[in-house]
Image: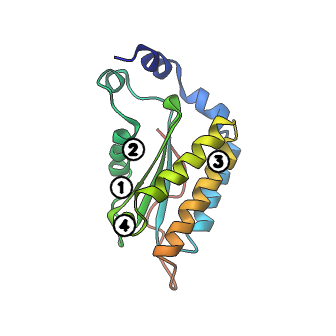
Amino acid sequence: MDIGRLIKHLLTTRVTVRRRFPMSSLEAIKAAITESERGHRGEIRFAIEPALEPMQVLRGMAPRERAVEVFSELGVWDTEENSGVLIYVLYADHAIEIVADRGIHASSGVSAWERIASDMERAFAAGDYEAGALRGIAAVSEELRRHVPRDGGGVDELPDEVTLL
């Protein structure tokens, strides 16, 4: 058991996250998602979770494992072309996970998502949360434009708002 990790998770709250991601940042992230989806047929969701529940930490839940759960809970998998992408931030662990649905994951591969997440983590470590999030959305959008470009109309299948868990 990692007692240091447990303490971090117990002390990290929604208030902590709101200091790093104020309403203006959440609105900028939403606007970036809305704008990006005009250029591709994918769907982007952005979720921020302050911390895991104590039992999740005690059993050693990894950020990736939780991101996959959130991917399912938010219905990111439920898009017409299986082209949903979740950008998941677990603030207490300073971890970013990108989970792509099978339709887009097969085309992009793991390395693209890991690179984008690493770039975002570096920006966040420097205290540049909004800019890091926006760069991450832009990079995910570029992958989606490359593999599922917009070819006419389209339906926005998932909400663009940031989900604060």
User: Closer to us: mark 4 or mark 2?
Assistant: 2
Q: Residues within 10 Å of mark 4 (few under 14, many from 20)?
A: some
Residue 128 placed where, x, y %?
70, 41
Q: Earlier in the sequence, mark 3 or mark 4?
A: 4
Which amino acid, by three-letter code, is at mark 2? Ala
Q: Nearer the viewer, residue 160 or 57?
A: 57
Q: Which residue is mark 3?
A: 132
Q: CA distance from mark 2 to mark 3?
A: 19 Å
Real-space Cα distance between discs 4 and 2? 18 Å
Residue beneath the point at 29% across and 24% down: 59
Q: Which mark is first along the chain, 3 or 1?
A: 1
Q: Find numbered disc 3 in the image and state the secondary structure of the residue it sits on.
A: helix
Residue at the spot x=41%, y=29% of the render? 52
The image shows residue 61 at horizontal and vertical percentages of 33, 31
In the picture of the structure, the residue carrying the numbered disc 1 is: 75
Spatial distance from mark 1 to mark 3, Cα to Cα? Answer: 24 Å
Mark 2 and mark 1 in contact? Answer it, CB < 8 Å.
Answer: no
Placement of 67 over or under 153, stated as above or below: above
Disc number lying in front (1 or 3)? 3
Q: Do callouts 1 and 3 mark residues in contact (Cβ within 8 Å)?
A: no
The circle on residue 67 is 2
Q: Label 4 sits on what residue type?
A: Thr
User: Between 53 and 92, which is closer to the camera in this rendering?
Assistant: 92
Q: What residue did someone put label 4 on?
A: 79
In the rendering, at what x and y percent does residue 148 appear?
Answer: 46, 75
**Can you name the residue that lies furthest to the bottom here?**
152
**Quick one: SS at disc 1?**
loop
- Which residue shows up at 34% across the image and 47% down it? 68
Q: Going from the N terminus, do you reach mark 4 or mark 2 first?
A: 2
Q: Residue 80's x, y, as percent?
A: 35, 72
